[in-house]
Amino acid sequence: MDSTPSQTAASTFDLVECSLYAEFDIRVDPIEWCPLVELDPPVEVQHQQFRDETCLLDVRTHDGEPRTVRITQECGCRCPSKVLTDAGYLPRLLEIYPDHVRLGVHLGERTEVEDIVERLRSVAEQVTLRKLVRIGSDSSVETAMDLTDLTDKQRETVTLAITRGYYRQPRRVSVGDIADELGISAAAVSQRLGAAESKVMRQVFDAFADGCE
């Protein structure tokens, strides 16, 4: 008697095109819950994943003889990577310092920047957007907006402006709203944004000029 293979239901999945890449500096003080702070820098994080409440890390250390080690530890409740992973993102832990960590994450759209910052703020004292990269149709072509040349105050102000919707059309907040949240004058906010925008626009212009050569 011939048997007919049973038909299995087609699996369903979500497909989101990631057109942006962002890097964040997250100040979480102290970070004694993270095992990486016990290692001598520099430490290269090769892979990180979570299994329930356990964090698994493969890292490359360069203190003396380079070696790759695996670390397994119960995850601290203030871990930024865990917060984003639980929300459905796939962050990559790039670097860790005594008072802050640097994460990279791919995004589907700009509105996710605001969502990520709000989630990170639940465990962090300060969240700074360090770099925002738009990935072109050719994955090898990227246009980067690197905010590392800005001062700490300029980055803080620009990050808040972006996440609060200052650069959206129509704008969701005013200069005065940002000033109230930062506890400074509207004139100071305008000065910081103007200086930051000037630096970023020079980056964009230089990138455009290089691409036309």
Image (cartoon, helix red, strand yellow):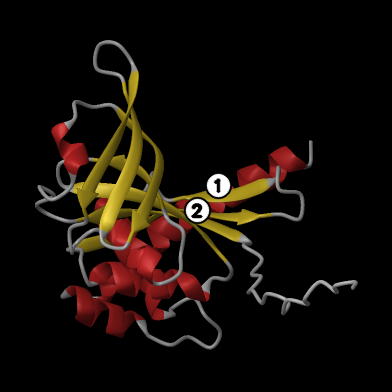
- Whether residue 64 sits left or right of residue 145 in the image: it is left
* Residue 196 occupies quadrant: bottom left
Q: Where 149 sits versus 186, above or below?
A: above
**Could you tell me which residue is drawn at 36 percent across and 69 percent down?**
86
- Whether residue 169 sits left or right of residue 2 in the image: it is left
Q: Which residue is mark 2?
A: 200
Outermost residue toward the top?
Answer: 65
Q: Where 40 sits versus 103, above or below?
A: above
- Whether residue 33 sits left or right of residue 23 in the image: it is left
Q: Amino acid at mark 2?
A: Val
Mark 1 in CB contact with mark 2 (< 8 angstroms): yes
Question: Residue 126 in the image: x percent, y percent?
Answer: 22, 62
Circle number at residue 213: none
Instruction: Please state, as top left, top right, bottom left or bottom right, where the C terminus lies in the image.
Output: top right
Instruction: Please state, as top left, top right, bottom left or bottom right, where the N terminus lies in the image.
Output: bottom right
The reply to whether residue 94 is visible in this rendering is yes
Q: Of residues 75 and 118, which is closer to you in this image?
A: 75
The reply to whether residue 188 is visible in this rendering is no
Question: Residue 15 in the image: x percent, y percent?
Answer: 66, 70
Q: Of residues 73 and 199, which is closer to you in this image?
A: 73
**Could you tell me which residue is drawn at 48 percent across and 85 percent down?**
171
Q: Residues within 10 Å of mark 2 (few under 14, many from 20)?
A: some
Question: Residue 68 in the image: x percent, y percent?
Answer: 35, 25
- Element under disc 2: helix
Q: Amino acid at mark 1?
A: Gln
- Whether residue 16 sits left or right of residue 39 in the image: it is right
Q: Of residues 7 and 55, which is closer to you in this image?
A: 7
**Could you tell me which residue is drawn at 72 percent across and 79 percent down?**
9
* Residue 26 occupies quadrant: bottom left
Question: Residue 147 in the image: x percent, y percent?
Answer: 42, 50
Circle number at residue 203: 1
